[in-house]
Amino acid sequence: MNRRFGVLALLAAVALASSLWLAFTLLDGCPNDFHVRGEICLSDGTHLAPSSGVRIPDAQTGLDNRWTLRAEVLLVGALIAGGLAFAASRSVGPRSADKARIQVGALRQTLQTDRQARTEELVAERQTEVTRLGRYPHLYARWMSGSSGDAIAAPATVAAVTTVPGAITLLVSHGMWSTWTRLAIGHERDARMARAEGLKSGAPDAYVPEFESALQAITQAAFALDGWYGATHTVLYDGRERKPTGMSGGQLLESLRRAIGKKTLESGSLTDDVTWLFPSRGAAVHHEPKATTGSEHPLASGIVPEEYARFKAEEATRAINMMRSVSEGCLATPTPALRAWSEQARGLPSELFEMMPSPGSSADSD
């Protein structure tokens, strides 16, 4: 009887020790359809980057620490050890059973203490990471184009931190306004190039490529400012979230006043630019064809439909210069309400600012 108790107790200890060893030596891994590359996981699927043509992974993520699997291993080990310990206690008399219960209690206490120590270690490690991300919230994933040198910036912003026993969850988001800005900058450049090529070629339909690029640049600039309005709404309006409705030009002007100050807003052409941009965006997105006498165009020998005259390289440059003024104001003259956001996001507006054409650029200068 004593031999049976010894065997069962030994098996219980082995099961518990094995689960502890397996849980804490389990290697980090990648999710399904991902593979390891250094310290990160890259998706097996790839796609071509729109601006550079370089093939890049569809997604990337950090190595999975497998805490759920580790916890499950510990739980299974504890259940097996507990079952063996219970069987051992049933195989001995009352006095030996009391000793067995004490041993099982000690094992459980050891397990609880070990798990608590590991949890505290994990919290400390993740808290260090949270502190770093909180100080530098915009992390850039770049795929450089060998031809143009442009970069695709994908900032991940820490929105919140949720702590539960044994884990820390980082809630992140991506500011879509930065993507729309980058796209608008590229299409404005294409519109100016189309103007220059059209003047050289003299083709009768040379104004069409310019129209297509300018149309995208102007609408994307409006989308970018709409996204900027949403990205800064909470800090500019005392923590209130943006309502799930569209933004008007008046609402954007009020946010700009709160963000860069009334003096900066009224010192340039921003007010007139906002008044011009959003009706142009509306005319493109909610278009209703109307027959008119047409308009002249620098690349046309006669008249062209009003739409082609409304979306030209000059208007695309005006939209980008407007965004340049907004970025410059956010960086140079932020109000107290925007200052913390401006400091945290400084890297991305600065990069986009450098990608934009100089204020002196025009359609005919190319």
Image (spheres, rainbow, N blue to C red):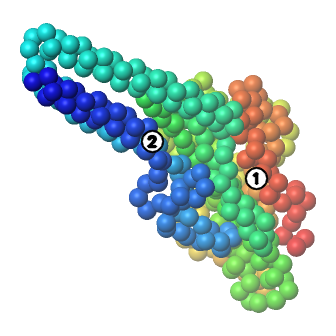
- Residue found at x 76% / y 53%: 352
Q: Which residue is mark 1?
A: 352
The correct choice, above or below, for 298 with respect to 130 in the image is below
Label 2 Cα neighbours within 10 Å, binned few <14 / some 14-19 / many ≥20: few
Percent position of residue 290, x then y = 56, 71
Q: Quarter holding the C terminus?
A: bottom right
Please provide percent x and percent y for residue 31. 43, 54
Badge 1 element: helix
Question: Residue 68, can we see it?
Answer: no
Type of residue at label 2? Thr
Q: Is residue 90 left or right of residue 258?
A: left
Query: How many numbered marks are there?
Result: 2
Say what secondary structure mark 2 lies in. helix
State whether residue 317 is above or below residue 232: below
Q: Residue 271: x percent and y percent?
A: 75, 43
- State the separation of the CA atoms marked 2 and 1: 45 Å
Q: Amino acid at mark 1?
A: Leu
Eyeballing the image, is 95 above or below 111? above
Front residue (pair 131, 359):
131
Q: Of the numbered discs in the image, which one, if any, rests on residue 149?
A: none
- Residue 270 appears at what percent x and percent y? 78, 45
Residue displayed at 69% across by 37% down: 136
The answer, for residue 325, to whether it is visible in the render is yes
Q: Earlier in the sequence, mark 2 or mark 1?
A: 2
Label of residue 25 in the image:
2
Quarter holding the N terminus is top left
Q: Does the residue at mark 2 contact the one at mark 1 (Cβ under 8 Å)?
A: no
The quarter of the displayed image where residue 93 is located: top left
Q: Residues within 10 Å of mark 1 (few under 14, many from 20)?
A: some
Q: Nearer the viewer, mark 2 or mark 1?
A: 2
Q: Residue at x 84, y 37 (%)?
A: 332
